[in-house]
Amino acid sequence: MRISGRNAAAAALGVLALTFLCGDLSAQGMPSFFKKQSSNRKRTDAPTVVEAATMDIDMENNIATLLGNVVVDDQDVKITCDKMVIHLEDKAETDESDEEAAKSETAESGEGSEVKSEAEAAEKPEEKKESAEKDSSDAKEEKDKDEKKDDTEEDDPTSGKQLKKIECFGEVVITHRADPNDSSSKEQVATSDYALYDVTANTITLTGRPVLTSGTDRLDAEKIVFDVETGRTFITTGKGTYYGDTPVGSAGGKKKK
Amino acid sequence: MERTARTILQITLAVLLCAMSGAGLRADDRGMRAAIRDYIFPQYRGHDGRLQFIIFGDEAMNRGAQVFLDQAKIDILPNSVRRLDDANIFLPHAGQRVPAPYPIMADQPTRRAYWTHPKQSTVRAWIFSNKAVYDKTTNILRSEDPVHFRSREMDADGVGFDAYHEKKFIHIRSQVKVCIRPEVRRAVTKDAGQGQKQEK
């Protein structure tokens, strides 16, 4: 797996901590900036087009750097910035690290399960047999799934590297277009000096005077993290300031925090 | 058959490279120039001799320290390829021409057909340009003409480029348009899903 057990635990802890810290903002009716797109809005297989003045491609390090008037025009989002760095990685690298993580997990769980199974064997030998049969069946199913997955990937000659992260520098403006299928949705805009899209964590982090706006709502903070999967926005550093007409919690009306 | 063609190619290459370097010296001395048709110009990294690029093209003109290339097609090789023997290259002398680049917004079937060609198996990426100049003193290949970069995950068009084979580094000078393929995004979604599962 790409995320090792330790990293996953750290990430989970981080998310929990952030949820706790920022719970009053996100849970009490804070307008959801860059909220998750509605199910009606289906993503097409259209490629993402990026325009820039110049480009450097470092094939050895799997890095592409776009410089000057960078514009990304995607179906849902438009991004402009001075510089964009696209980090790619080998799929093989991911697979290897996945295998290593899986091995270590197996080793860790293996030690514990050995002790447990010995104890269980002494008490319930029949259950152990059933459990072993079930495990064997599960393992076979997993193996079949993996084989199918490998076949699919090998069949696709156009699949080369995969995205690792994208960094945006200088005058970053991220515009999340309003959903044409949802009349209540508004165009949402984020501005900052730096933005990082971390593919592994599936988060967008804004630093350097980040400001989020959605209609008349506005949120300032030192560092803002947007979880792409859940659509939630977190302020991780410093105090967030919210200005807007959207009711916050039960108080409602205009509120400044 | 292919082995014979490869052997002929390797001998031809060796002769051509010797001729190019020799002709280069003579050209400096006597103002002569040497032209080569259907050239294949492998470029190796200095410190370990690893094959980095293979430059294909219709005609190369050697003038002093510079080689002027027509219809340059640069095969950027993956790290798994160390020598010419490891590469599954197109052999122009055997009628195997490097296919022209597909349009930058080409659909998936078109790109699939392009990259499934057996000779593309050891190609990491291509750079295409009508005209280019290779400087033997700096090892930099440059062009002021439109350039097309094609790879499995990302395609780019632009105007003018500089390519440095030692570092497998390419600079596109202006009017850059990049197309990031949905396959890359799908990988993202899949991995993100796995990450979420792990966290749970």
Image: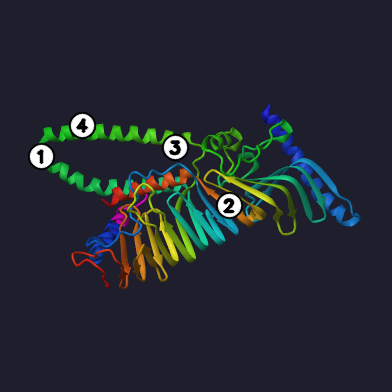
Whole-percent x, y for residue A37 in the image: 35, 50
Secondary element under disc 2, as helix, strand or loop, is strand
Dot 1 alpha-carbon crowd within 10 angstroms: few under 14, some 14 to 19, many 20 or more: few
Q: Give the range drawn in magenta.
A: A1-8
Q: Please report whichever mark, 1 or 4, sits nearer to the chain's N-terminal start.
A: 1
Give the label on residue B37, or none.
none
Residue highlighted by disc 1: A122
Residue nearest the observer in this picture, B19 or A61: A61
Q: Alpha carbon of mark 1 to alpha carbon of mark 3: how far?
A: 45 Å
Q: Alpha carbon of mark 1 to alpha carbon of mark 4: how far?
A: 18 Å
Residue A116 is left or right of residue A206, and the answer is left
Whole-percent x, y for residue B132 in the image: 73, 51
Secondary element under disc 4, as helix, strand or loop, is helix
Residue highlighted by disc 2: B177
Amino acid, disc 2: Lys
Residue A243: tell me if it is visible.
yes
Outermost residue, right direction? B30
Residue highlighted by disc 4: A133
Outermost residue, top direction? B1
Residue highlighted by disc 3: A153
